[in-house]
Image (cartoon, rainbow, N blue to C red):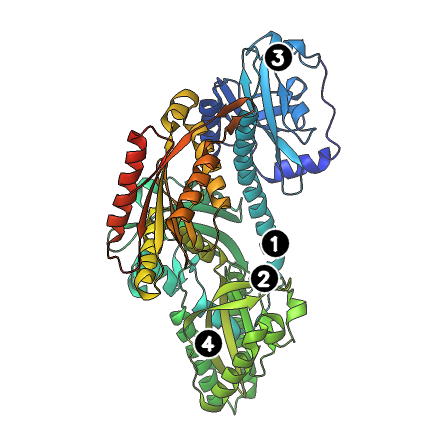
Amino acid sequence: MMQAPLHPHERERLSLLRALQLLDTPPEPAFDRITRLACQLLQVPVAVVSLVDEGRQWFKSRVGLDPCETPREYAFCAHAILQTEPLVVPDAVADERFRDNPLVTGSPGIRFYAGVPLLSRHGYPLGTLCIIDTRPRTLAAADLAMLRELADIVTEQLQQRERWQLAQRQIEEAQARMNTREQRLRLIFEGAGAGIALLGAEGEWLSVNDALCQITGYPQDELLALRATDLIYPGDAPIGHDERQAMRRGDIDRFQLEQRCLRKDGSLRWVSITVTRHYEALDDRWYQILIVKDIQQRKEAEAALHTLQLELEQRVAERTTQLQLANNQLSAAMVQQQRVEQQLRKREAELSAVLEHASDAYICIDERGVVIAWNRQAQETFGWAAVEAIGRPLDELLIPLDLQAAHHAGMAHYLRTGESKVLDQRVEVPARTKQGGTIPVELRIRALQLEDQRIFSAFLHDISERKRAEQQREYEARHDLLTGLPNRRAFFEQLHMAQARVAEQALPLALLFVDLDGFKEVNDQHGHDAGDVLLREVAGRLQQQAGDGMLIARLGGDEMVVLLQQPQLDESRVQQLAEHLRQLISQPVQLGPATTAAVGASIGVAIQQVGQQMTADQLVALADKAMYSAKRGGKGRVRWS
C-alpha cells in the first residue's frame, strides 16, 4: 500500500480546516442532499463528503457507508487532495497504490473510486466529494462533469463558511477601532436596517429599536413588557439553549442562530439572531447585544431608535438644567459634569458596538460635500478605505461624472432654501467604486444641524443582486431556457407589432412554421437529453441565419417559427429561404462522442400582404395548417397556405 505524502501547504491547510469548525459536527442537510444526489445521479452505492485532518479522514456526510472516519494512511482522499484534477480509480485492485489497502481487501471492499478536491478560497484542499463502488467501472465524461458540479456546490458551502469566519474576524478587529461621537452614532440607530436590542445579564430588556418592533409586530411599550423568551416559537425553543447557558457561564462571548419569531398577530417569521456578550467597564456590568435580521423577506428592516434619541436628549437637557442651577457651586457642578460625561462615554461605547454590526454602508459628509465618516461596510462596498475616503469630496469617490453637476446643484439649492427631493426618502442611484465601475445602490440620507455646522448622514445599500435578478427574470419570461430563442410570449409580442407595421408602413410579412420530422424517434432511441442536444443545435443553426427583419422563436416541443418582414418580400424569396432552412436542419447532428442523428423539417408558409386584415392567431393557424399539409404530403417539404 502506497501512503500519500503530505500536502505542500499542510500547516496552512490544517489551520484553515480547524478554523472552519466542521470536524466532528452533526450532519447538515446542505451536505447530505449532495451525497444523496450523487448516489442517485451517478448510480453508485456510496457517496461521501470527506475532510482530511492530521491522522484521519472524517466524513461530514455519507451515504451507504457505516464508519464516520478512517485512518488517513488508508484514505484514497489523501491522494486526491494532492492534485488539482479529480482522482479516478477504475479498479483499485489493478492500481499499485491501493491493491493491498485494507479498505480494498476488507470492508467495504472498494473497487471503484472517484474524488474531486474541495478547495478553500485560496486554493487549499480541505477534503473531497467522492463516490465509491464495490465493483470496477469507468466514469463517462458527462458523469465526471456532473461530479465536478456537485463538488462545486460543496465547495461553495465551505467557502461561504470561510467567508463567514473571515467576516467574523474582521468584525472583531474593527470593533476596537470604532470611536464615533454621540450624535453621529445616534443617526446610525435611526437608520439601522436590522432589529437591535440591549439586554441585561439576566435577559431583561434595556432598550429596543423600531426595526425590532416592526419584525415582531409589537409596539415598543408592549415589547418592553415581555421577555425575550415570549417571542420564541415553542417548537424552536430548544434551538440555542446550550449556547445561552454557555454564555451565562461566561464560556462563550458570541453565538448565532436562526429560529421563528412569534409575532403579535400570531404569525411566524424566520429571523437570524446574533447574540454578543459585552462588558461595560464603567459600571462593571455585562450586557447582551442582540442583532435580529428578518430573513423571511431577505431584506433589511429599517431601524429607528426613536426612544433612545429621546432618552439622550432628555439627559442632555437634565445636564444643562443641573449646570445652570449649580453655577454658584462650582465643585458640585464639576462632579456632576464628570458623571454626565461618563454616562455619555458609556452610551458611545454601546452605540459603537451596534455600529460594528451595521449591514449598510454609512457615510457622513459636511455641507462642503467632504467625507467626515466612513464605516467598514462602505469600504467593502466601494473599495475605498476609511483613511483614503475621509477628508475627500464625495463626488471624487462615489458620484458618477454625469451626475456631479446635479449633485452640486442639489446641495447648493438645499443650503440656500432648505428644500430637497432626496432627503428622508428611499432613492435608487448609481454609485462609483474605487475600481472605476458603477453599482446601483438604495440611498437614504438625512440632514442634521450640529451646533454651527450642518452634516448629511447617508445609508447606502448595494442592490446589484436584486437588479441582476430582475433582469434575469425578464430574460427568462421571454426566452426559451433550452435553446435561448425567444419563447411563445415574445414571439406573439413581436408578431402583433409586425402586423401593425403591415398597415402603418406598408410592410408585408411572412411566417414560416417549422416542425421537425423524426424528432420523436431520436427521443425514443437516444433519450430526452439527446433530444435536447438536437433542439439546441437546430436552434443555433436557425439563429445563425437570422438577419435584419427576421425573428426566430420556439413555440414549444419541436415547433419553431421564423417571422420575416422586409420592404421587398416576394414569394420566391420566401420559398428560397424556407428550402435553405429545411436543408440546413436536415444535416446530421452530433449527439455524443460516437452518436449522430438526422431529422428533417416540414415547413408551412403564410404571408400577410399589405392591406390584408387578419389576427395573429389566424396567421399562425394558416402557417400551422400548411405545415400539416407538408407532413401529410410526405414530410421534408415546404407548403404554402
Is disc 4 in contact with disc 2, using a CB cutoff of under 8 Å? no
Residue 224 x %, y %: 33, 61
Q: Amino acid at mark 3?
A: Asp
What residue lies at 38% left-to-right and 62% top-to-bottom?
211
The quadrant in which residue 500 appears is bottom left
Q: Is residue 540 left or right of residue 21?
A: left
Q: Is residue 244 left or right of residue 284?
A: left
Q: From mark 1 to mark 2, how far is it between C-alphas?
A: 9 Å
Q: Quick one: label 4 or label 3, which is nearer the N terminus?
A: 3
In the displayed structure, 492 sits above or below 186; it is: above
Residue 617 x %, y %: 25, 49
Query: Mark 4, mark 3: which one is toward the viewer?
Result: 3
Is disc 1 in contact with disc 3, using a CB cutoff of under 8 Å? no
Residue beneath label 2, please? 376
Is disc 1 in contact with disc 2, using a CB cutoff of under 8 Å? yes
Badge 4 marks a residue whose secondary structure is: strand
Badge 1 marks a residue whose secondary structure is: helix
Q: Quick one: label 2 or label 3, which is nearer the N terminus?
A: 3
Q: Which mark is residue 446?
A: 4
